[in-house]
Each structure stands twice: as C-alpha cells, then as structure tokens.
Image (cartoon, helix red, strand yellow):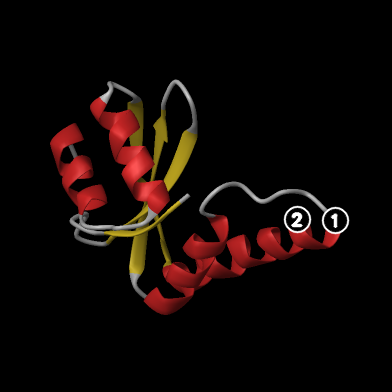
Amino acid sequence: MNRDDLESALDRDDSTSARAARAELQAGANFELFRSQTASARQLWDIWSHRYQVMLDTGVTPRSGLAEAVDRLHAAETARTYLATITGSQRRFTVFLSEDLTRCIACM
C-alpha cells in the first residue's frame, strides 16, 4: 500500500477522524500498514469496545474518534481487517482497513 492508496481509502470515509488523518498524510506524515496482521472486525470491536468502556468507567477522556470507530467496527461484523497507523505532527491515528485495502472501515 502506498501513500496514494491510503489517502484514497480515507477519502471514502466521511468521519472527522478520517479527514484529519488524511490531512496529516497529505502533509507528509509517516504511515505504516501492518500487512502481516489481520483480524476480524468483531475481534477488534471486542478489544476496542472494552478499552472504551474502561475509559468511561475510570473517567479517562477517550481519544478522538474512538466511539465512532467502535460503532463502525461493530457494524463491519466479521470482515477481515488490516491496521495502519499514521503518525503526524499533531496526532497519531489508527486506521482500520478493509481486506482489499480500498476502504477505511474506521479511524481514530
């Protein structure tokens, strides 16, 4: 996956986090795709929904986009998902990509 492919996948997602991640990517942020690691969206939902709930229970402010990402992972059900990170000057993003790497399932 190259920078243009990741930008294209993020461009198909209308969430605030995806737009911000795309802007960081266009500004030259580093990115990494974890191609050797894939999981079902349901597995990722289990992990991230638990983390989200713990944050709420303990008074920790969840990272921007986490609630929406949890909802989108839940909606994606058993779809195989790849993870990517974008590390920009302002923020670090976690991007959940479809198995064919053409679509952003969720971004936070």
83 or 38: nearer the viewer: 83
**Percent position (x, y) of residue 41?**
43, 69
The answer to whether 58 appears left or right of 1 in the picture is right
**Percent position (x, y) of residue 43?**
52, 69
Which mark, residue 55? 2
Give the quarter of the image for residue 6. top left
98 or 21: nearer the viewer: 21
Q: Quadrant of the N terminus?
A: top left
Give the structural element (helix, strand or loop) at label 2: helix
**Percent position (x, y) of residue 2?**
17, 35
Distance of mark 1 from mark 2, alpha carbons? 5 Å
Farthest residue to the right: give it.
Answer: 58
42 or 75: nearer the viewer: 75
**Residue 77 visible:** no
For mark 1, does the 10 Å Cα neighbourhood hold few (<14), some (14 to 19), or many (20 or more) residues? few
Query: In this picture, is 51 found above or below 28?
Result: below
Residue type at numbered disc 2: Met
Residue type at numbered disc 1: Thr
**Percent position (x, y) of residue 47?**
61, 63
Give the structural element (helix, strand or loop) at label 1: helix
**Tag 1 near tag 2, CB within 8 Å:** yes
Instruction: Count the numbered circles shown.
Output: 2
What residue did someone put label 1 on?
Answer: 58
Query: In this picture, is 68 found above or below 87?
Result: below
**Residue 28 visible:** yes
Residue at figure coordinates x 37%, y 40% from the top left: 20
Residue at figure coordinates x 28%, y 23% from the top left: 27
Query: In this picture, is 90 found above or below 17?
Result: above
